[in-house]
Image (cartoon, rainbow, N blue to C red):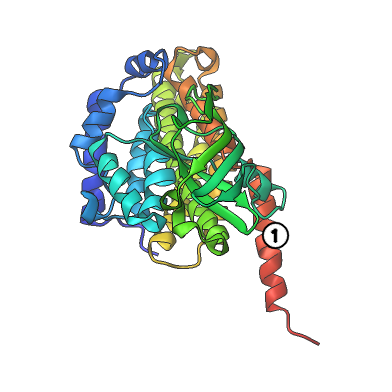
Amino acid sequence: MDFTLTDEQHAVEEAATGVFAGLVTPDRVEEVEATDDRIDRELWAALAEAHLLGLAVPEAHGGGGLGMVELSVLLEAQGRVVAPVPLWATLVLGALPVAEFGSDALQAALLPGVAAGDVILTAALADVANDIAVGGPGRPSVCAGTTDEGLVVSGTAFAVPFAHVAARVLVPVATVDGTVVAAIDPAAPGVTVERVVTTNREIHPHLHLDGVAVAPGDLLAGGDAYRGAEVLAWMLERAWTGLCALQVGVTEAAVAQTAEYLNGREQFGVPLATFQGPKLRLADASIDTEAVRVTAQQAAWRLDNGLESAREVNVASWFAAEAGQRVVFATQHLHGGMGADISYPIHRYFLWGKQIELLLGSPSAQLARLGRQVADALRDEEVPA
């Protein structure tokens, strides 16, 4: 594949980098982390004004109609500055599935607001991802009964990114006929939002659902349980790929900041960068970063081009988790005592790298899933005796 960005993708990169560079500083991130919702609202409004929140929203709803590659470029830019805004949750977990599988009414109600910066979306995928990690089919922890008016949903959706500020949460639901995905309002009767703070200081609440009514128009793919597995696989592949793109930005910036630190910090009268040990370790971190980048780009490109992507997404996810955590650990360690200072910028990259590593499956879970995919492919290729 060709890794060269198109002119349109370069424009996205320049616009995103410009917005983040103008508004995101370590001091500003620290201020936002002390707020109640942990979202930089000024930055969110600026991203909307730059038409970046509507990148993958269909043109009919005020967006750009672009794809996963362009979203990855935006997420990389966010990762470089660890900006506290719900881009991955709103654009990848929420807007993409609504645009692909949502009813006309649901799209009209949500997508123009996403592009304008007025609507935040998210999805509850942690339980499904955890079930897949242990070899399961992706069973939801939330279940539903059927009434004449639609579904009545009960259960707990764990660790839902930014659910405390979301207009809708896409929740996989187990029914007697199979799995469906429901767009649930966190403020609806029967929903309790339990605040949870994550490793990188974001808010990922648990949603406790007790007899929550869901209308047929709020079900993706028309509530067709036979398509439930397809919808979930589609969502998960893009969710994992979006995390990979974030990890590209995090690791790239961590390596760059560490190189600057090693060149400026002296020991025995010479820069630390002149010593072989730090030099080789940072070189390994740089190689790991490039591995995360190329595998993430391949996954995003295959998704946008309608190609079989399950194995490529899994490879990218494993590199983002395994190599990504190696990079953030090495870069923090190479800062010595400064790396242990939680007020020093490099520490925040370590937290983001660890959060991304474990968010939808640990490295061992990703590797086990890849092993199952390879084994299945080999069985399919076996020639009968």
Whether residue 247 appears in this view of the structure is yes
The residue nearer to you, when weighing 50 against 192, is 192
Residue 76 locus on image (x, y percent): 37, 40
Residue 77 as seen in the image, left or right of residue 297: left
- Which residue is located at x 72 percent, y 48 percent? 134
Q: Is residue 157 above or below residue 266?
A: below
> Furthest residue to the left?
49
Task: Please name the residue shown 44% across and 41% down the image.
Answer: 248
Describe residue 293's horizontal placement relative to residue 329 as left or right. Answer: left
Residue lying furthest right in this view?
Answer: 385
The reply to whether residue 275 is visible in this rendering is no
Q: Is residue 309 above or below residue 42?
A: below
Reading the image, the residue beneath label 1 is 372
Q: What is the secondary structure assignment of the residue under circle 1?
A: helix
Asked where in the image residue 380 lies, by quadrant, the reply is bottom right
The vertical placement of 308 against 340, above or below, is below
Name the image quarter holding residue 15: top left
